[in-house]
Amino acid sequence: MVDNMPRESTKAPRHPRIAVVWSVLSAEIERFAAGTGATMRILDVGGGSGGFAVPLAELGHDVTVVEPSANALASLRQRAADAGVTDRLTAVQADADELPDVAEPASADLVLCHNVLEMVDYPDTALDALAKTCAPGGAVSVLVANRIAAVLGKALSGQFATALDLLADVDGVAEGRDTLKRRFETATLTALVGGSGLVTEQVHGVGVVGDLVQVPENAAGEALREFELATAARVPFRDMATRIHLLARKPMR
Ligand SMILES: C[S@@+](CC[C@H](N)C(=O)[O-])C[C@H]1O[C@@H](n2cnc3c(N)ncnc32)[C@H](O)[C@@H]1O
């Protein structure tokens, strides 16, 4: 596993909370461009209203969003129209389980699954489907909620009973009171991804402190951004962040 510090990109969105994810995606885009020079085919599973998909289309890539919510898809279409990228964005109403029916095998150079594995019924089945859709040599970008951060967050706000419940539960959820079906840790996520035949190349923490503090819009916002980028790959900061981002590659054969 390569555990490098992410690079900055001038074109991607600069918000401190997601700077790390964009730096990894930007590097993957550059890597692809250096190899084939072609526009990337990007699949965003559970892409919601296009928080990642629309900026990627704005960068010139062909993006397909597979998303079960009709409301989210309506917002996505509006957002794409506002950004002038309707011709580069395809919206498909389906969930991750239906991926084999709506996307061809090996049809995407980059597959995104951000903030979705926490809510699907079977994350291993979903990851198998993502891996199948990814072209050999392509990458899969996974972003998930980190159970360690959830435990710490509850404890820091004085909710010790809930913190202990999250700590004790095998899926890192508070039974009956949680909006998510599960949270992950770095090791469990890496193992899950490996089970689908993907090779983890990078793991970063997203929101080491960015979700705990108010994000300022001035120079202090830039300083926070710098802090997030500097700590994202460094243990133990990485493993305490609100979310875990993993970039995995599909072997050529
Ligand atoms: C928290 S949002 C994340 C949206 C986007 N990926 C992002 O990171 O900005 C989760 C999205 O997953 C979608 N979703 C829920 N269950 C899903 C499933 N089984 N398969 C695919 N998407 C699902 C929801 O409709 C929602 O749009």
Image (cartoon, rainbow, N blue to C red):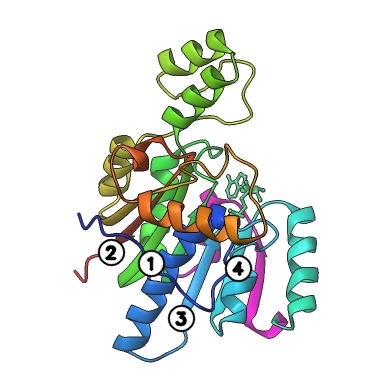
> Mark 3 highlights which residue?
40
Q: Crowding at label 2, few (<14), some or many (≥20) Cα neighbours within 10 Å?
A: many
Can you tell me whether the CB of the residue at mark 3 lies under 8 Å from the nearest atom of ligand 1? Answer: no
The answer to which of marks 1 and 4 sits earlier in the sequence is 4
The answer to which of marks 1 and 3 sits earlier in the sequence is 3
Image vertical order of residue 90 relative to residue 47, above or below: below
Amino acid carrying label 1: it is: Cys
**In x, y percent, where is residue 198?**
27, 56
Amino acid carrying label 4: it is: Ala
Image vertical order of residue 18 relative to residue 54, above or below: above
Q: Crowding at label 3, few (<14), some or many (≥20) Cα neighbours within 10 Å?
A: many
Image vertical order of residue 201 relative to residue 124, above or below: below
The answer to which of marks 4 and 3 sits earlier in the sequence is 3
Q: For the magenta stretch, what is the residue range?
A: 86-106
Using the image, tell me which numbered label, if any, was put on residue 250: 2
Classify mark 3: helix, strand or loop.
loop
The answer to which of marks 2 and 4 sits earlier in the sequence is 4
> Mark 1 highlights which residue?
134
Label 2–label 3 contact, CB within 8 A:
no
Query: Visible in this render: residue 99?
Result: no
Label 1–label 2 contact, CB within 8 A:
yes
